[in-house]
Amino acid sequence: MELIKEMLMSSLLTLVVALVVTLVFGPVFIPWLRKLKFGQEIREEGPKWHQKKSGTPTMGGIIILISITVTSMFYVKSNPQIVPILFLTLGFGLIGLTDDYIKVVLKRSMGLRAWQKMALQIVVTAIFAYYITTKSSISLAMRIPFAPGKYLDFGTVGNVILLFIVVIGTVNGTNFTDGLDGLATSVTSLVATFFTVVALGLGSGIEPITCATLGALLGFLLFNGYPASVFMGDTGSLALGGFVAACAYMMQMPLFILIVGFIYLAEVVSVMLQVSYFKLTHGKRIFKMAPIHHHFEMCGWRETKVVAVFSIITAILCLVGLLAM
């Protein structure tokens, strides 16, 4: 009982520290972004009412990354399990930062070319895969939801191939989710809460970084909630995707992303379906607009309603995920 109490207190302290770092750093960093005119350009093909957001400072994901990194550094020695998670989070965050820098500072609206972004994502994922398979005792066999003690194993080659698909898919799904004020922040806060509960239950030792991420996101939500005073940009969304994928693999839970990360999956699948159907039918669409959160906006939902509904769905699915353990 004393050990459990100590773990809970330590986790709460980590969350609070990350929250405070975000709340202190945010009000300093956001005006600096605004002064440098690092504003978001809103796509013309997007919902017309989003045009009023043009010029809102972006690259706010830097705040999240600093908060997570600063807080996690206190636990690197005692909890080395967080290192690969921190690596994947920062690795994808730096890819996003490069993309944002090219868009916002160099004024190249497309940012990194698609092949450049994919190549960098493959490199970062490959380093993570190498660490997991050669430097850690973590198995790539995956826990099967609702089947305690049973694992799905495709062999070394199959598991590594699947790792690339899961990591890159999750990262890009999280990126597509970042399209409304507070959406990616809210959804990922709930997913981070899920991973924290599971990490504590399994004694995996990764709870310092899950709590740090949760604290950073709760603090960032105060600036990113509707109406947002800052966007996280690809810096934040890609980093959060890396965080989710890494946490899942460190606890052999990539299959659980299909449950707790359903919103990420729905976002990326909606884009894939829209693009494919558009090409096959020479101009017809399945959704009024993709990613799917824009479809609901075009159906008349307020932005805040979309965020609330998607967050509620994620909260329910996180409870389902806990039951599936």
Image: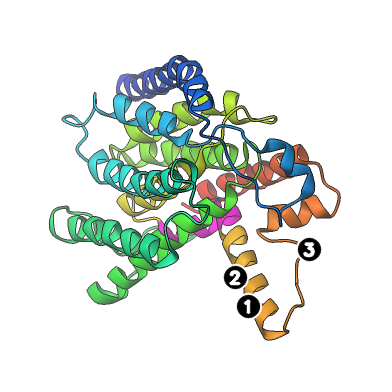
Coloring basis for residues: rainbow
Name the element at disc 1.
helix
Residue shown at 33%/24% (left/top)? 7
Residue shown at 53%/36% (left/top)? 58
Residue 18 in the image: state x and y as whole percent: 40, 22
In the drawing, what numbered circle is on residue 272? 2
- The residue at which mark 1 appears reads as 276
Image quadrant of residue 271?
A: bottom right
Residue 272 in the image: state x and y as whole percent: 59, 70
Q: CA distance from mark 1 to mark 3?
A: 14 Å
Is residue 259 on the magenta stretch?
A: yes
The reply to whether callout 1 and callout 2 are in contact (CB within 8 Å) is yes
What kind of residue is marked 2?
A: Met
What kind of residue is marked 1?
A: Ser
Q: Residue furthest right?
A: 300
Residue 181 in the image: state x and y as whole percent: 65, 37
Mark 2 nearby-residue class (10 Å; few <14, some 14–19, many ≥20) = some
Give whichever of discs 1 and 3 has the lower sequence position: 1
Image quadrant of residue 279?
A: bottom right
In the rendered structure, which segment of residues is drawn in magenta?
254-264
- The residue at which mark 3 appears reads as 288
Up/down of 186 relative to 142, above or below: above
What kind of residue is marked 3?
A: Lys
Residue shown at 17%/54% (left/top)? 137
Mark 3 nearby-residue class (10 Å; few <14, some 14–19, many ≥20) = some
